[in-house]
């Protein structure tokens, strides 16, 4: 009888341990989610023989809008040219409504084309959505179990693999790593499942 009780107690203990959310289990679930839906950043860039470079408003890390001035944008395009992802040559300078307008011939190189996610043809130019970064799991930092709703909050670190086009965004401009809290839920039949996997 004692042996039977001992085996039952051991079985319950193993069952409890197997149902616990560990770092390795959380990482496996996050990796599976990333394989189905990778985390990538994107930005628009126009190409053609007569493309205007303008000042741009872009979201920063705080969720607020930041302004890249015209001078800053021209320098960013020059840097993209120096990185070998675009060709760029000055076409003309015209008087605009409140300031001068600057037009360039801008085209993607073969190196730049590898970051293109989609392309839309306009009348005299093309608009490309290009990748600015991809995020990979760097590790689990902390697990906070919430028994009352059979769930957990997991603090996760993501590593950012940036492309040259990342300079066109203010967000994550000076960061190589981003941390975020992800929600997990323990389901009766399937066990632990992760909710939305993203950077914010």
Image: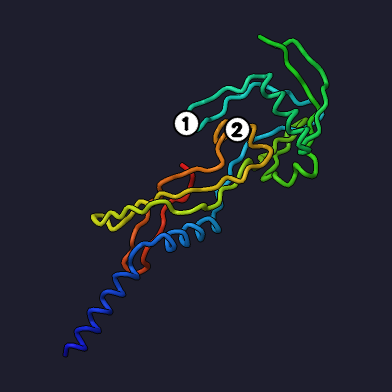
Is residue 25 left or right of 36 when viewed as pictured?
Answer: left
Please state the horizontal and vertical placement of residue 173, each as a whole percent of the image.
58, 34
Q: Which quarter of the figure has residue 91?
A: top right
Q: Residue at x 75, y 44 (%)?
A: 113
Instruction: Report how far apart the C-alphas of labels 1 and 2 lie in the structure.
Output: 12 Å
**Contact? badges 1 and 2 (CB < 8 Å):** no
Q: Which quarter of the figure has residue 109?
A: top right
54 relative to 145, above or below: above
| Label 1, residues with CA under 10 Å away: few <14, some 14-19, many ≥20 | few
Please state the horizontal and vertical placement of residue 119, each as a whole percent of the image.
70, 41
Please state the horizontal and vertical placement of residue 5, each as a whole percent of the image.
19, 84
Identify the element where label 1 is drawn: loop
Q: Residue at x 38, y 62 (%)?
A: 22
**Which label is found at residue 19?**
none
Q: Of 54 and 120, which appears nearest the observer?
A: 54
Q: Which quarter of the figure has residue 103?
A: top right
Residue marked by disc 1 = 63
Mark closest to the chain's N terminus, 1 or 2: 1
Q: Of 105 and 153, which appears nearest the observer?
A: 153
Identify the element where label 2 is drawn: loop
Q: Residue at x 81, y 17 (%)?
A: 92
Residue marked by disc 2 = 169
Residue furthest bottom as drawn: 1
């Amino acid at each position: 009888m004692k042996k039977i009780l001992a085996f039952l107690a051991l079985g319950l203990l193993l069952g409890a341990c197997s149902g616990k959310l560990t770092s390795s289990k959380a990482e496996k679930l996050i990796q599976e989610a990333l394989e189905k839906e990778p985390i990538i950043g994107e930005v628009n860039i126009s190409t053609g023989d007569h493309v205007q470079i303008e000042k741009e408003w872009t979201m920063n890390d705080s969720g607020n809008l930041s302004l890249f001035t015209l001078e800053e944008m021209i320098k960013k395009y020059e840097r993209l040219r120096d990185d070998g992802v675009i060709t760029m040559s000055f076409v003309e300078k015209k008087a605009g409504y409140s300031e001068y307008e600057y037009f360039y011939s801008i085209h993607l190189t073969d190196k730049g084309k590898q970051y293109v996610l989609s392309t839309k043809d306009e009348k005299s130019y093309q608009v490309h959505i290009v990748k600015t970064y991809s995020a990979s799991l760097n590790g689990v930092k902390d697990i906070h179990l919430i028994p009352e709703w059979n769930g957990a909050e997991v603090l996760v670190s993501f590593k950012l693999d940036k492309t040259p086009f990342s300079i066109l965004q203010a967000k994550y401009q000076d960061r190589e790593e981003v941390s975020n809290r992800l929600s997990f839920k323990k389901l009766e039949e399937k066990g632990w499942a992760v909710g939305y996997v993203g950077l914010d």
